[in-house]
Amino acid sequence: MKYKVNDSCIGCGMCTSVCPAVFHMGDSGLAQAIDGEVKAEDAAAAEEAMGGCPVGAIEQA
């Protein structure tokens, strides 16, 4: 599974705190997802980050 962060991101950092293996803050101050498949051991945390995003900025790619 892959994830992407859309233009709705407000840079709150929630996803990076829940799943730092998949999400990080970019130079723009907004979240970014790794480019590639999420490892099995990170899948539950990535799903939690997607569900917890306050603006729905995380999508499955």
Image (cartoon, grey):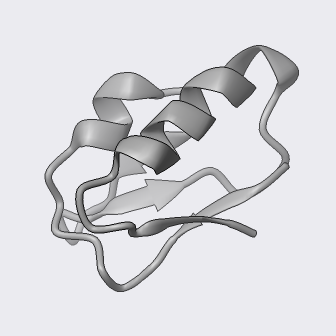
- Between 38 and 26, the residue placed more toward the observer is 38
Q: Residue furthest bottom?
A: 7
- Determine the residue positioned at 45% across, 59% down: 32
| 55 is higher (above) or lower (below) than 21 | below
Q: Is residue 49 left or right of residue 42?
A: left
Residue 4: x and y, percent? 59, 66
Q: Is residue 50 left or right of residue 26?
A: right
| 46 is higher (above) or lower (below) than 36 | above
Q: Is residue 11 left or right of residue 33?
A: left
- Determine the residue positioned at 32% across, 59% down: 26
Tell me the quarter of the image containing the C terminus: bottom right
Residue 35: x and y, percent? 71, 58
- Determine the residue positioned at 82% across, 27% down: 39
The quadrant holding residue 42 is top right
Residue 38: x and y, percent? 78, 38
- Determine the residue positioned at 38% across, 25% down: 18
| 19 is higher (above) or lower (below) than 6 | above
| 41 is higher (above) or lower (below) than 56 | above
Number of marks in the rendered image? 0
